[in-house]
Amino acid sequence: MIQGRTWVFDQVPYIKSSAAVGGPFEAKGPLADDFDILHEDIWLGQDSFEKAEKVLMENACEYAIKKAGISKESIQFFLAGDLMNQVISSNFTARKLAVPYLGLFGACSTSMESLALGSLIVNSGFASHVLVATSSHNAAAEKQYRYPTEYGSQKPPTAQWTVTGAGAAVLSQEKTPEGIRVAAATIGRVVDMGISDPFNMGAAMAPAAVDTIEAHFRDLDLDENAYDLILTGDLGKIGHRIAADLLEKHGLKLSPDKFDDCGLMIYHESQPIQAGASGCACSACVTYGHVLNRMRKGELKKVMVVATGALLSPISYQQKESIPCIAHAVVLEKREGEE
Amino acid sequence: MIQGRTWVFDQVPYIKSSAAVGGPFEAKGPLADDFDILHEDIWLGQDSFEKAEKVLMENACEYAIKKAGISKESIQFFLAGDLMNQVISSNFTARKLAVPYLGLFGACSTSMESLALGSLIVNSGFASHVLVATSSHNAAAEKQYRYPTEYGSQKPPTAQWTVTGAGAAVLSQEKTPEGIRVAAATIGRVVDMGISDPFNMGAAMAPAAVDTIEAHFRDLDLDENAYDLILTGDLGKIGHRIAADLLEKHGLKLSPDKFDDCGLMIYHESQPIQAGASGCACSACVTYGHVLNRMRKGELKKVMVVATGALLSPISYQQKESIPCIAHAVVLEKREGEE
């Protein structure tokens, strides 16, 4: 069923399993225990950062499939994307998986874009099992989007730290004992407020997050108590504050304990992350690790994750374009004991 | 309904309208009359090739919406992708359209990936109207993937010429007088036979096309007479011959008048295109222009387009990776006079 631009999923899909993989920097963060694998080496034994990122995504996919207790062949479709040019991390993971593959690009919103589309496919009966995944690698992203890390270039306090990691989930038509399912998804529009500073993505993306959250609440006629937790993807300190302010100004006052940002959760403030974390893996790791673990324990029943993406490229930035941004929201719901 | 990895779409979506936009090189080709707009200037009045490509996609989208006779606001979702890093042509078109947007990446297979996913969304009732589009620009692609054209570097005869153009279509739940609908889609797996020469994409992609065509025929239990025409996306001379040979070897003999390649149709052989055409816009322009026009005239009733994509990046190639390839197939069917 569709309401406005929100897809409402009746009954299915259930999240059969999920996996989060991180690197050494993530291992030092407060959510370390929620990762399935934490690599000590940012190279992951590979000879390039791009190949290291591919291994992160392969790890997450293999682990999610293993935890689901199904065979690789049961995965009917693999939906994935990442930050690398031509989404090579996803393409090469798809080559290894050898299952039908749909490549996506939504920058850091890819986590929820893939979860939304994968859920729609399972919900409408066009698949029994779908695997969704995304990844990012700090050094690979720095090299491609900004400067090689070897330059040691300084960054302003508004900059964010790209997460080295990957997240994956298996979606299924079968009910699970945990009873966690995807209940709805709101697809974002491109919002561009004219910000052109690639070292201040949080501020650029905040209005897109607000646009999607407001559309979601309007589409489903909800009030501020609808969710136990609303998480933006990677707005960081500056963007999250802007989003909260804008929402309040527009009449939606979310209490601070119910409105947080994945980019403010994955690292300690003492880590040198400037304004917070970012990257496709930021919202993916926090959602597929920490959030789902809290839902499994029953600490959270209804959570909305609003993954934000900055859809620029180095070329569009060099050609003086401002930064087009987007946010896709997905609602996770625990329905234990229900039949 | 799903059979194997083929989505079978019952009744809807109908193709409400389509548009094809090209450049000066396409205007000299045999399919010129099937384009809606042909630009004389490869810069399209812009100051960069990337911005020119964006205008191509904007043109195609605006024209498709106009021909559909609906307002821009009736478009519920826009699904698009292109060859540029971070699919910026699609992102900036989505910014202009300001409708909910899902970015895709499947290299040159994006034409049918977007059509397949858009059709699934409409078919399952999660949208009434969806817009799908893709684009490519010869000079922008050369600059990004190979060498700036100013170098005048020579190419081997296996190389292909990236189409400058864009294609778009409006999918709808409403029956149209033309009665052309999307009947099925088969999603491709990544196939990589170890070819690593980026100047021989046709040979690299052929096995992926064969894999998808065979899966489609197997899933739906079809024989070689099932379609009036099967079109691969951009295999060119070499790849198309390989695909035909492989299919015949595997027991599926398609007669030459029923098995063709968009990359062999869009230009005259006398144009300096080496082994044929390529690019996202190749299969998109041929499908959304020429093929649909022939279907509208009743010359073709049932056509399958198998768009092929080479999922490499310059970085993956430089790091000595072979070329992972994919092909997505979509079946178009004309059901005139049916109720």
Image (cartoon, coloured by chain):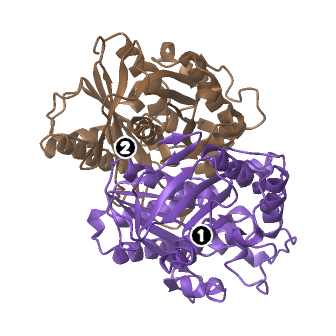
Chain colours: A purple, B brown
Residue identified by numbered label 2: B328
Name the mark on residue B138: none
Q: Residue at x 53, y 23 (%)?
A: B20
Q: Residue at x 61, y 65 (%)?
A: A280
Q: Is residue A182 visible?
A: yes
Image location of residue B279, percent across then percent down = 50, 38
Q: Is there a contact, CB below 8 Å, between mark 1 and mark 2? A: no
Q: Residue at x 78, y 59 (%)?
A: A253
Residue corresponding to mark 1: A281
Instruction: Tell me where residue B71 sits by quadrant.
Output: top right
> Which chain's residue wears label 1?
A
**Displayed quadrant of residue B251:** top left
Figure check: B107 above or below B27: below
Residue mark closest to the camera, 1 vs 2: 1
Name the residue type under label 2. Answer: His
Q: Measuring from the top left, give residue B318's x and y in whole percent.
A: 54, 63
In the picture provided, is B267 more to the left or to the right than B259?
right
Q: Amino acid at mark 1?
A: Ala
Image coordinates of residue A232 in percent, x first then y, are 68, 63
Q: Is residue A209 left or right of residue B327?
A: right
The residue that appears at 51% across and 41% down in the rendered structure is A2
Q: Which quarter of the rendered picture does the C terminus of chain B lie within?
A: top left
Mark 1, residues whose alpha carbon is within 10 Å: few (<14), some, or many (≥20)?
many
- The answer to whether residue B269 is visible is no
Q: Secondary structure at mark 2?
A: strand
Can you say which quadrant of the picture contains the N terminus of chain B?
top left
